[in-house]
Amino acid sequence: MCAYLNRRGQVIRVGVGTPRQTQIPPMELPRYGAERLSGIRCIATHLKAEPPNEAALTAMAMQRLDALVVINITGTGFTRRGGGATGYVKEAYVAHLVPQDARTLIPSGAFSGSKVQSGSWSISPPLDLDDLAQQDFIDLVEGLEEEFRREFVAQEVDADHDRVLIVGVMTDDMSAQQFQDTLAELARLVDTAGGDVLQTIQQKRSRIHPQTVIGEGKVQEVALTAQTLGCNLVVFDRDLSPAQVRNLEAQIGIRVVDRTEVILDIFAQRAQSGAGKLQVELAQLEYMLPRLTGRGQAMSRLGGGIGTRGPGETKLETERRAIQRRISRLQQEVNQLQAHRSRLRQRRQHREVPSVALVGYTNAGKSTLLNALTNAEVYTADQLFATLDPTTRRLVIPGAENGETQEILITDTVGFIHELPASLMDAFRATLEEVTEADALLHLVDLSHPAWLSHIRSVREILAQMPVTPGPALVAFNKIDQVDSQTLALAQEEFPLAVFISASQRLGLETLRLRLSQLIQYAVDSH
């Protein structure tokens, strides 16, 4: 049996089974940080004369218990007359967590002869009941929390930043390099969103677990790591279903989000114009709607007849209907935005000014190139999705005939990313139409990125999903000042018609202008 006591000595919970089987669900535990313990200790009986096993110690760590006391009872049996059980306490063990910085030493307040096990907890030597009764648990806990607090402060924790644990799952359809690139990109996304990545946990599986994505043992590892590091957010490297999020949060005890939600958060931070904010809100609501979950009372409906009677309309249904109304209103506004941008494009086409859309993977340097070509003042930063709103500027290029100059319009579009969320594709259709309506595309590639070939494939896959086939494209490799000769030679061999530039150093821009002139002439002749 296991009895759970608070610091006042009051029994708050009793369970039949091991500490692992009777542990308190994470959602029912009091809120605490990495600098505190939960304020609860567990007293468990055990029928074998041995220290607590790893399953019991892991349960202690996941709940951040003040202590785990295991009392070994031997000789248990029944009297001949069936009057009751007989047996006696042979020995007891006390285990508690140990701060990371003190794991090579015995922390202050620990029991004499304690041994640090597994780098996470300390186990006392066997104690009899008299020795156990004389222990000052409050003094022990206060000493431990002081060390946890000192360690927590030493880490320079920024309260404004989420402390993030990343979880990645490698399936059979992924190569090791693709998997590592995905995790590295997710870490960049979390950093861009304002989170601090404390650790990454990986698992290789033949297929995704339908309930929890990762296996049960790995869920326990994630929960233990999150508690040990004081994380307040777990980010998965793939989209999660609403049921998976609920299951994971129930077992881990902290908020769980997927890659799409991180991207949506970045978009919400980056949106500056009214059109951008409108599209971001639409994407967020479309993502949120299927993830509204009932808490407590089940969903019910007003009506008449079998299956429709109930206590009335729940708050969940009220929220869902309000969100649906808001989505409908936002979609109407996006349609109006599309119509407005379509009129602007028609006006430009009527004036016979050719246009080029600047596309590419996020952080490829599109805004930097636009600034270098047109002296624009678009915001640039070494971040993913630094700019969302399309910016159009005039660019003078050499004319294809008679050496005369020619004016074109060049538009900086939102950056693409591997597996761009469907809700973003739908919400940003007004922005993405700038790509489909342009006479030609300038596909910018960050050659300094290790996964530049994968980035090219991702952009082309997204372009192939467009409702209207975009015009001809010119590939331009950017940041050539940051790559070695071997990478440069490989790119030249794979893409002999590409242009090689450095937008920040203004290298190769004249060649780019000439190639743009030829591209525009080809696009016009094709029409």
Image (cartoon, grey):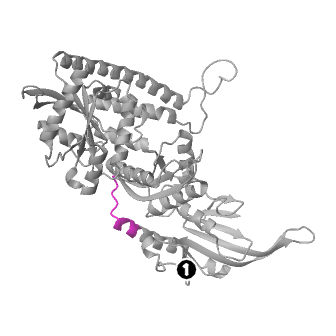
Amino acid type at mark 1: Lys
Across and down, in percent, residue 81 comes to 93, 69
Across and down, in percent, residue 404 comes to 6, 27
Q: Going by the picture, which residue comes out furthest to the right?
A: 81
- Considering only vertical position in the picture, is 41 above or below 418? below
User: Residue at the spot x=68%, y=18% of the render?
Assistant: 305
Task: Please give left or right for residue 350 compared with residue 190 in the image.
Answer: left
- Considering only vertical position in the picture, is 126 above or below 2? below
Task: Give whichever of 427, 160 is nearer the camera.
Answer: 427
Across and down, in percent, residue 171 comes to 53, 50
Instruction: Specify whether residue 383 is in view.
Output: no
User: Magenta includes 216?
Assistant: no
Q: Residues within 10 Å of mark 1 (few under 14, many from 20)?
A: some
Judging by the rendered image, the residue that carries numbered circle 1 is 115
User: Magenta includes 150?
Assistant: yes
Across and down, in percent, residue 391 comes to 21, 32
Magenta segment range? 149-160
Task: Give whichever of 256, 140 is nearer the camera.
Answer: 256
Task: Give whichever of 232, 262 is nearer the camera.
Answer: 262
Question: Which part of the image, by quadrant, shows the N terminus?
Answer: bottom right
Res 348 quadrant in image:
top left
Instruction: Specify whether residue 173 is in view.
Output: yes
Task: Please give left or right for residue 213 compared with residue 349 in the image.
Answer: right
Q: Going by the picture, which residue comes out furthest to the top?
A: 350
- Considering only vertical position in the picture, is 100 above or below 30? below
- Considering only vertical position in the picture, is 353 above or below 126? above
Question: Which part of the image, by quadrant, shows the C terminus?
Answer: top left
User: Residue at the spot x=35%, y=53% of the render?
Assistant: 161
Q: SS for tag 1?
A: strand
User: Residue at the spot x=60%, y=79% of the render?
Assistant: 134
